[in-house]
Image (cartoon, rainbow, N blue to C red):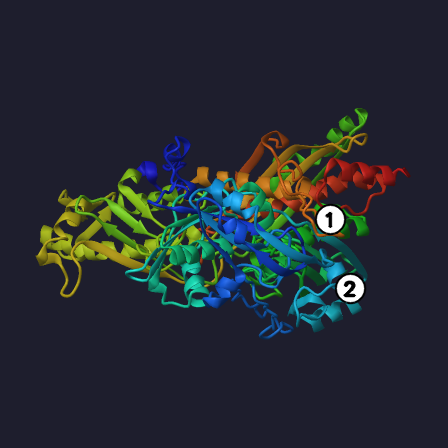
Amino acid sequence: MGEFAFGQPVKRKEDPRLLTGRGKFIEDRREPDEAHAVLVRSPHAHARILSIDSAEAGAMPGVLGIFTGADLDADGIGGIPCEFVPPKFGISGTENCPVIRPTFPVLARDRARFCGEGVAVVVAESVAQAKDAAELIVVDYDALPAAIGTKEARAPEAPQVHEGASGNVSFSWEAGDKPGVDAAFAQAHRVVSVELVNNRVVIGAMETRGALGLYDAGTGRFTLYTATQMPHGIRHELAKFVFRVPEQEIRVAVGDVGGGFGAKNSLYPEQVLVLYAARELGRPVKWIGERGEAFLGDYQGRDNVTRGELALDREGHIRGFRVNATANLGAYLAPEGPLSPTLNTSALAGVYRTPAIHVRVTGVFTHTAPVDVYRGAGRPEAIYLLESLIDAAARELNVDVVDFRRRNLVSPAELPFKTSLGLVYDSGEFERVLDAALARANWSDFAGRRAGSARHGKLRGIGFAHYVERVAGGWAERSRIELTREGRAIAYLGAMSNGQGHETAFAQLVAARLGLSIDDVEVVEGDTDRVASGHGTGGSASLGIAGAALDAAMTTMLARAKQIASELLETAPVDIEFDDGRFIVAGTDRWIPLAEIARVAFEARFTPPGGKPGLGEDGDYLPPNPTFPNGCHVAEVEIDPETGALAILRYTMVHDFGRVLNPLLVEGQLHGGVAQGLGQAGFERVVHDPASGQLLSGSFMDYCLLRADDLPNLDFVERSTPSPTNPLGIKGCGEAGAAGAPPALMNAILDALVPLGVRHFDMPATPERLWRAIRDARGG
């Protein structure tokens, strides 16, 4: 139907339920006779565990059980796995990069390696009883020196995080064309370099993590209710590595998820513990994380130090790009811990025709919470380095930042364009996007606005970032479509919403294709018993891959429905057309609705031999090539030099997301991504005490999240070119805001500070840090 067609701004169908308190989050789920778990966490970043005395705690009212790492070891419970292997890119890439993978225990055994690591779990009739008992558990620690930053961890005298990890290094990986880069630098007219800190952040999802475990002793089957983005992946890891049982013996079911951003992709110790305790105690066991625990125990994001160098010729063309990065992995490898600093370094190519790129990444263990994927998963880190370095190169050459980019942009005539890190850009009009962004932001009139700020004693700056990222490539999805007897549609998807609006997007996709009302489409996700397989949600790929698979399923289903329609209409299938929910005999007024086909398909005469009655088909899709969303963000800021207060005055975005299904959903994704990107650049930073390893930013009193009044109106313009390789023409949008925002904001801030002589400034741009930079530039 037209109102639900591709490109229509359909309002989210899940919002009335969520906004009126009828959502089903993990805390909302209740099981009869459920017990409650509370973890005892290490107060030390590094300590030997000499003994754990739980006798007094075990005698407390309501306590059902207390478990330690020794109990789990005795029962053969495995640790948290990391299967990711950094890939090989380019002629100088590391083949089968060796990765040191120490055991990541569900509960610490003889040693605690980060502040907040679980040491014991108490299960009781109520949360209050479990907390009271947990406070009585006596753990005898021998506190040890801790290594918090990567520089400290690699020092010769640094405390060892794990035996066997020399210099606390987990892996050393490289990619690209080292000989080509070396040659480019040997011949360079000018070399420009920057060294940047990409600060560690907490995920800060609205819903904290939680898990509810059940065990059926009669069938030997586990059920885990949890908030995750990848239910099938969680089932796989629990089955293969933790409990070592067939996957069909574990069900993972997910309701509503209040934000994930990558941190809810992976398996966590608490998900294991509720299942283990449920089996041991014969009762459902629930754990709901508190906000303080989220700061301590959730996987965190970013955290690397990177040096980038550009080799330039006399005309200001980029000839080579050399990158050396050190990534803080935390105390253990999270399930996808090595992914961000390696897999998505391909984003370093950006929108520029750089003939040779070489990247070296060293992954380092420290006594901090493990780091895993966070919105963008390495692409924002790469784009931040590249776009900061591009601005630095323009300043070094004393040329305009726009002109410098123009002379290096990939043009439409060069597409398909193969980057020196192996990607093939199949579409995009990068200069058109750049021009549109600069015009929309009134770039050419900025000098007048800067002068106006100066008259009021303020520093004004403008900056932009131009990006392209790889999306929707690397895995396959299977989706299923079924029609009920009443003609309603049910879509079964291996994706998993964590706030993006899947119920609306996929229902709209089905409604547009089948001519249904969006209210007549049910979307089923997040239950491994109802959905046969699935990758889950990550990498902005849900609609691009799972949606393409769903479209393939609908194509197959409609072909079968047409056969039935041809028999009912007594017409050859070739003479039947399908439009707006009706099978029509071409050139006549004879037609039959899809709903009627759905009803008769359950009759025996239309049931294929050995098949099931009704209309239901699977669809598979494996992308032949990634898609390449791209865009340009322009930020304009004002800084009060007396206080360091930062005001983001204007923010403009022009994006090419390919064919857009629902503009409202796209704009919502952009707003959220930009808020997170600006949050990291201007406000957020995880801080540890360097001596003890204690977390100093352990609450929202100490860790600053961006607020609505910190943002201006976010101005978004679409300039899309359909993806030629995706069946729906979609490119993906979920992480674009987080990719473009940090370099755009930081380039604007540095533009404001450069007249004072400031040449370098790291995220986050807090008032205190800005004030100090301005004071130092003015000589105190």
User: On residue 539, which mark appears?
Assistant: none
Q: Nearer the viewer, residue 374 or 624?
A: 374
Query: Is 281 left or right of 411, judged from the image as shown?
Result: left
Q: Nearer the viewer, residue 122 or 692?
A: 122
Query: In which quarter of the view is residue 341 placed?
Result: bottom right
Quarter of the figure with the N terminus: top left
Which residue lies at the image location 68% right of the left edge and 35% below the top edge? 636
- Is residue 381 in sight in this rendering? yes
Amino acid under disc 2: Ala
Which residue lies at the image location 44% right of the left edge and 55% below the top edge? 230
Query: Is 512 left or right of 640, judged from the image as shown?
Result: left
Q: Earlier in the sequence, mark 2 or mark 1?
A: 2
Which residue lies at the image location 19% right of the left edge and 46% below the top edge? 594
| Residue 175 at x, y percent in the picture | 64, 68
- Is residue 268 in sight in this rendering? no
Q: Which residue is mark 2?
A: 155
| Residue 365 at x, y percent in the picture | 66, 62
Query: Is 376 left or right of 327, judged from the image as shown?
Result: left
| Element under disc 2 | loop
Q: Which residue is mark 1?
A: 689
- In this rendering, is residue 695 above or below 110? above
Amino acid under disc 1: Asp
* Number of residues whose C-alpha sits closer than 10 Å to that of mark 2, classed few (under 14), some (14–19) or many (20 or more): few
